[in-house]
Image: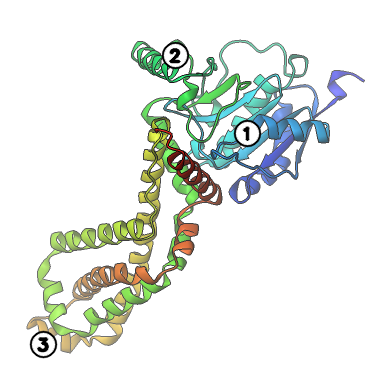
Amino acid sequence: MTDATRTTVLDLVADPGLPTELAHRLVRDLPAALGEHDDARWEVRLADEPIVLDERGALPALDIGDRVRERDGADAVVLLTDLPRRSGADPVVADGGTGHRVGLVSLPALGAINQYRRCRDTVVRLVTEHLVPPDRAGAGESGAPDGGHAGPLTRIDSGPRAGTDGDHRDQDRDRDRDRERADGDPARRGPADDSDAGSGGVEDDVDVRLALTGLRGRVRLLAGMVRANRPWRLVPSLSPAIAAAAAGAAFGIFYSNIWELATALGTARQVTVMLIALVGMTAWLILDNRLWESRRHRSLREEMLLSNLSTVITVACGVLAMFALLFVLALVAAVLVIPPDYLSSTLMRESGPDDWIMIAWLSTSMGTVAGALGSGFADDGAVRQAAYSRREQERRARLDRADDGDHGGGTPA
């Protein structure tokens, strides 16, 4: 059988939720995309294998991939996860072990838009350039690979793993020196520091990492983490807060003194009141439901910062969606309840459409403050489930247990 008629088998293993949805689309589209880079025929399958984190919340991708490849007889395995991974401070889009023919794509690093296209192009690049043996990987190509729609990915070669605290400090200094030397020049970057890889995890045999460096990469990772949290799910979990907010808004609709105040405030003051209400409710939800993450381990500080920032944005988006919904309801109620003649007599001038808008706006801001108090009756578990992806919940739970174990054992952080 010639190479042109041989079939190369790629197995995909995906986290539940969005990764699985993308994997089903990739099973359909990848054979043609891979065939453009290789004369061989491609078969892409979705493997039935759970992705389980270890006790530190890290993802042992090579172990999982080896198990799938040996069991199913695949030529290569790629895992799709919504767990963020880092190499030092750089978000890792994809990594893998060429000797194992196993790779992993981290969806958050692909950003919040065009995620499927970026995922497809990243898988194609990872498989055809690194995972499949050379005699099956489109020999004859030369030069630097094109990032395509996946973005300008940088290959970061793995360095030796640190074994002591002294090694950690030395690698920290080396990494800082490498960054200063390579500022803006990915080709001159030194080895990544595995000790600061974050809870996404690294493994000894990982020898390929494709990362987005610099501020652009971190912004894309943050956007992807917010999307993975799916902030729109937060609104249904805040039904007690919405009920309290609706009651507060109704007070503004029926109380004529609020009409006078709303129309006298002006746009700038209305915006200020709205922002105070939104910030207050966002902060209350985060603190009251213990969504703020705190870690003792120095190597997790940057990951903790990104995680907390994504939590703030996720909750803020949910609160903003609730505000928008409440504003529409308040505006409809104001138009139906307040007669134009009565509003004109109260304001002692001719009323117009902007008056109903200002009344509904202030009423909604008042209702949002009341909603913050009502959110205390929301179920903590429901809010956490809505604010985090399933993988993020698992990661935090495992890290909490690890932190408690370290603290209980007297080990310094």
| Position of residue 99 measured from the top left corner of the image (x, y, whole percent) | 70, 19
Q: Quadrant of the N terminus?
A: top right
Q: Which mark is residue 189?
A: 2
Q: Is residue 325 above or below residue 393?
A: below
Q: Quadrant of the C terminus?
A: top left
Identified by mark 1, the residue type is: Pro
| Position of residue 182 measured from the top left corner of the image (x, y, whole percent) | 38, 13
| Position of residue 96 measured from the top left corner of the image (x, y, whole percent) | 63, 25
| Residues tagged 3 and 1 counted as in contact (Cβ below 8 A) | no
Name the residue nearer the viewer: 185 or 306.
306
**Element type where label 2 sits in the image:** loop
Q: Residues within 10 Å of mark 3 (few under 14, many from 20)?
A: few
Quarter occupied by residue 315: bottom left
Q: Is residue 40 above or below residue 404?
A: above
**Element type where label 1 sits in the image:** loop
Q: CA distance from mark 2 to mark 1?
A: 26 Å
Q: Which residue is mark 3?
A: 345
Quarter occupied by residue 339: bottom left
Residue at horizontal 22 percent and vertical 76 percent from the top: 356
| Position of residue 238 measured from the top left corner of the image (x, y, whole percent) | 41, 68
Q: CA distance from mark 2 to mark 3?
A: 72 Å
Evaluate whether residue 196 shows in this view.
yes
User: Which mark sits nearer the N-terminus, 2 or 1?
Assistant: 1
Evaluate whether residue 112 shows in this view.
no
Q: Which residue is mark 1?
A: 60
Name the residue nearer the viewer: 167 or 52.
167
Q: Is residue 182 above or below residue 405?
A: above
Identified by mark 3, the residue type is: Ser
Q: CA distance from mark 3 to mark 1?
A: 71 Å
User: Which mark sits nearer the N-terminus, 2 or 3?
Assistant: 2
